[in-house]
Amino acid sequence: MPANRVRPSPGVSGVGRTIPAVRLTKVPSTRRRPTSLATRVANNAALLRFLARPLRRFAPVLSIGRVVVVTRHADVVDVLERDEDFTIAEVNAATMDRIDGPFILGMDRSERYTRERAILQTCVHPSDGERIREFVTATARELVRATAARGRIDVVQDLVRPAATRLVASYFGVPGPDEATMMRWMRILFWEAFMNSGGDLTVRRAGAQAADELHAHVDDLITAGRAELDRGQQVPDTVLMRLIKAQDDPATRLSDEAVRRNICGVIVGAVDTTNKATAQIIDQLLRDEGALRGAQRAARDGDMQAVAQYSFEALRFQPLNPVLVRHVARDTVIADGTRHRRSVSSGGTVYAAVLPAMFDGAVFGDPNTFRHDRQPAADLNFGHGMHSCFGRYVNHIQIPELVAALLRCDGLRRAPGRQGRLEFEGPFPDRLLVEVVDGPVVARGRV
Amino acid sequence: MSTIERADIQGFVLSGYAAMHEARYVFLEVADPAGARRWLGELASRVTTAIAPERVRCINVALTCRGLAALGLGEAQLSTFAPPFQEGMTTPYRRRVLGDVGPSAPDTWAWGGPSASGGTVPEDRVPEDRVPEDRVPEDRVHVLLLLFARDLDAMEPLLEAELSLATADGAFRHVHTLRPEPLPGRLSVGKFGVEHFGFADGMSQPVIRGSGQDGKLAGEEARRHVAATGEFVLGYPNGYGELTPSPWLPGPDGTKIDVGRNGTYLVVRQLKQDVHGFRELVRAHAGAAGSDPDAEARLAAKLVGRWYSGAPLARTPHRDDADLATDNAFGYAEVDPYGERCPIGAHIRRANPRDSIAPERARALELTNLHRILRRGRVYGPELPDDATDDDLVERGLIFMCISANLERQFEFVQQTWCNNPKFSNLYEEQDPLLGTPPPEGGLFTVQGSPIATRVRGLTNFVTVRGGAYFFLPGVRALLTLTTAT
Amino acid sequence: MPQSPFTILTPVLEEHEAALTELLRGIGDKVMEDRELGLSTLDRLHYASFSIVRGDDGPLLVFEGNIDGSTAAFLEHLLGTSPDGVDAVYRHCADYPALADGDRDATLSYLLSSDIGADTFFVAWPGQSLDMIRREELLRRWIQDFLDRPEQAALRQEDPVEVHRAVVKAVRDDPSVRWALEAEPLPFHVRRPRTVLALLAVPALAGLVSVVVAAVRPGPARRPVRLVLGALGVAAAGAVVRLRAAERADDQHEASRPTDWETVYAAWSKNLGQFRHREDTKGQNHLSSIADVKPGLFRLLTLRSVLAAIRAVATLSTVRGQLGGITSIHFARWVITPDRRLIFLSNFDGSWENYLGDFVDLAARGLTAVWTNTHNDVGFPHTTWLIEQGARDEARFKAFARYGMVPTLLWYSAYPQLSVANISNNRAIREGLRLPESVGGPEFWLRRL
């Protein structure tokens, strides 16, 4: 990992604030939390597909009390595009505030949204793609090689989480004090931010604490980065350093706090989401012999375009977020001009059900069949509209590379018995054991 | 609902006239009722309405209940006005409601206090052409002429011309003038004015539905702050969808002439700030907010609820964040239910508890928005330099003005039930850390925190009321009606 | 110990009203120091008030009390401690057998027989005696002072569990507060309202099911049960029709009134001063008001049913410390007088404006159902279906309520410095001392301090 600049752990004292050390020793454990029924249902894509079918057919816009569920593709897209009727602040702003501070994911159209999104955008360059690909390819190969010798790989713990964490360090510029801590922070923060709608107290406490620790850590990185820049030192070209450099120009200047909340907001969504997507893709491919063989062939041929197609088609069957939530900001109509049009009144909640929408026969011909070359591709995997995934450009590269690294192993198959099943910690895949005969074969046509 | 009648509404209701850098608030006493009515009638044509912003000067006018009486309105007619307006600010009951006790008691006010003799002050005590240093009792505060001008060059002739018109033929006596500091003064990073304690001020204002400003705000902020037109202008549906009782005069054949429509009530209070005392307290107790160099700023922020820049603690609890300086789309219920970011008793949390006063967030916001006021304050007196080590004993503060259609449910409620209430939001015995009148042994302020709260003691009287009165800010048509009625 | 209300209603002697008013106002102005009635020395008295209302045959003195234990025991005690004070007040009332005359039983039975109790009585925390309230406040202060001591500064770095442990230890070590570690539970129905509800629901459901079964299944009971059910249905439908007719009649009455309500209220509003004499002098306030029940048996029956329903809701509520979402009421009651007037007496936190605002914002329907059956010169706002509109007309409802107010001549509160929320919080602090999990664990317990 040449680019991985791991500095000595700065401890937990951030600038201007100390976190009582004693509390660190008592990290509330989220392990072995009984997974709630709701989470289990949400994790079970096959069940969701089954349940959604009659809904999409007979009640495409189902409204019960103040809750509306939208299941057809056109309507889901419509809801996600009408970001001033169906807003996100009521859904996300408070949780973003709790763990990070205002971040674009919790903001509706506003001056600040436009400005901060634009500044973030200037700090990711189109040319970064190649660099990301090289880094991920190398990291993944190394990780797979390290464990393949044992004949077993845990897709989650041995490959995806460390790989994504290292990309956060090398590309986004936020190395953790150590990898395990960083993985813990990323998981619990994402969990608290987006998956803890039930307000589980253990998760909440662990989230608050992880937030304090991460913020102190990133504050230190920013201070150090600024100091290095001021001294004229050569600094690694990372997103964080670009944000810090952008402070020199008033037009793109974010306060230190704003740099911190923006970079943290980005990276929190960059590890366990990638993990979940990749694990579910592998799990899905392992269920489908034909798809698996096709994907393996593409991986060995070095046809990354095709690997990506296989991956995102697999993800269609087990998407990252089966539903996206929006708030109804004003009285309006869903599916206007159709026979199933429905008025919704302000104050309600809309569930834009992405999963059934991606099985909508009107858009996806023969939706229940795995077809990697489908047109259009499974377009809702990364959301849609102004709040579609900020990191999609990264994950369009990273995820297929991680998948390909596994596919290139000889004799890839699910570990037998219980161990081979995808296991979750709360909403996140925590283990997926696969067996391989041999380490990764270098793709043909590539070095 | 129909749009609002801008041509009939005084401009001050919809705008604080930020482009008008100079302001003079002139208090007049009616000397000759007939002449005074004539002057008011003529003034109606010069009054700035809410149609379009003036570029050079603005004139608005408001009257006290005593002023209406002095113009010749009878008791029966006055009784249709809001009770607080009729009673004035200085009755024993209203002192309790507003917290005007101790050093803030009206007896010591520079203007608007009860008259010593119970009657009018003898003529020779306050010569008509002089702005007196003496107290101006409430029975001499009849008309408030609000003059605004782009700069001093425009203000001087305006003030002179208007004063000479008002006092011509002995219609009025000029009793007092308030002179706020010229804008822009000190500005915060978010381009809002900075008040004397050093905080950006004026970010959080309700937005009047139908005023045209409601469309400009971005998403969530608009949803949080848009209030019904009738909350600020009489004659339109209020937050309950009803019409707030409006004053009227008897017309021919038993009809009623509504003189409230497009008018509203204006609260004016001169609030003296003890900047040195505030800084002393912050210095002495900074340890309560941490042991680092930012601790003073943090304690100050804890007392106020926003950082100096204006960034809300609810959004950025650990450090000031200039990029959040104008943020006003936040709430407390979800992020900070226990006050560990923004203390429960912090000034801005008391003055506007947002979504925290009822179990259900959306409902709480609705309820809170039934108690909003439009603030129109301006700073007066010179700044106390940041490095001042002693109090310079110069008076400085805020000429607080606010607009609300229902004084009891809006201004007085905020003052009594939120700011001054020791029991606010399950607290025990503390008042607003800035506005409250603490007991002689010093006030208490609780900084909630984990694992335990910190109690800051020894708060002194940082804000002292130096004058105040309730005014009626009539619509233009109503102004004409009032001047022709007898 | 259960709390009970008394509302002693006695006719005031002609010509004595002014003297009695003056006497009561005089005591009221220094109620904490007064030793004649000595209210502040009574250890079972939460709140008391005296006011004078209009009756059909002249003025009536209303003596309201909110006490621990029974009215008889309380009055007996009062007669023992303050005979001169009681005589001084009641000698202005008709047929009063003075204690000075020596027949104490006669005096007691005079007062007891004049007690009309309460048709609906609300207590924020049933079972919490004055003594408990006072001790738990002392405990709260004790713990806060302990935590604020400079030598305890190290606790600020500790885990909540450790802080809690340290407090418990300190409490145990101090004999003056050690009592706090012993259980002193509230009555079962307050602690376990859901259990009580469930226990009541079972027989109710069973009864309902058996009635339905009896009405459906062939058998000897079917016919009479169906007849009864049919009659009930007809009666209910009739009541609704009757109600709407009454409401339409009210609307007509409103349309034909000579002076509109705004004028009536504006003219009256200069009387506001006499209510505000003592309003907002402390954190709590007292409200006494009276309104005439609208004429006719129907309105009286409706009012009684509504009050019974509210009583049931208040008794079986699963959330204590609130009535209809209003969290500022310590004690409140409605009582219908023999001459068809509805008296409302309430001891609450905060200002009148806040209280009435809560009425409108949180409990408009329930309060409409009560007061729509009454009227005064301002008149209750237009109501439909017993609960709709009504109090939602904010301005008029507040005018109606203000107009109906009766000046409270003497008011006593045993703990004017405590709000309902404070009392609940103190209770939770005390409970959490022993069982921190009862308030969500040590972390949440500490947030209450």
Image (cartoon, coloured by chain):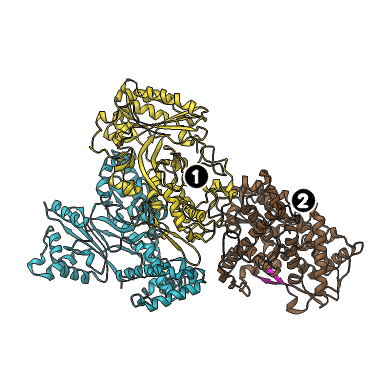
**Residue C246 versus residue C428 in the image, above or below:** above
Left or right position of C88 against C340: left
Which residues are drawn in magenta? A421-431
Q: Does the magenta stretch mainly form a helix, a strand or a loop?
A: strand
**Residue A409 versus residue B269 in the image, above or below:** below
Give residue C47's position: percent from left, percent from top. Answer: 27, 62
Q: Nearer the viewer, residue A34 or B462?
A: B462
| Figure colour of chain A | brown
In the picture, which quadrant includes the C terminus of chain B? top left
The amino acid marked with disc number 1 is Asp
Q: Is the residue at mark 1 from the same chain as the one at mark 2?
A: no
Q: Which residue is mark 1?
A: B201
CA separation in Å, label 1 and label 2:
39 Å
Residue A226 lies in what quarter of the image?
Answer: bottom right
The amino acid marked with disc number 2 is His
Residue C149 lies in what quarter of the image?
Answer: bottom left
Q: Nearer the viewer, residue A212 or A371?
A: A212
Chain for mark 1?
B
| Figure colour of chain B | yellow
Q: Which residue is mark 2?
A: A125
Q: Residue at x 17, y 53 (%)?
A: C21
Which lettered chain is shown in cyan? Answer: C
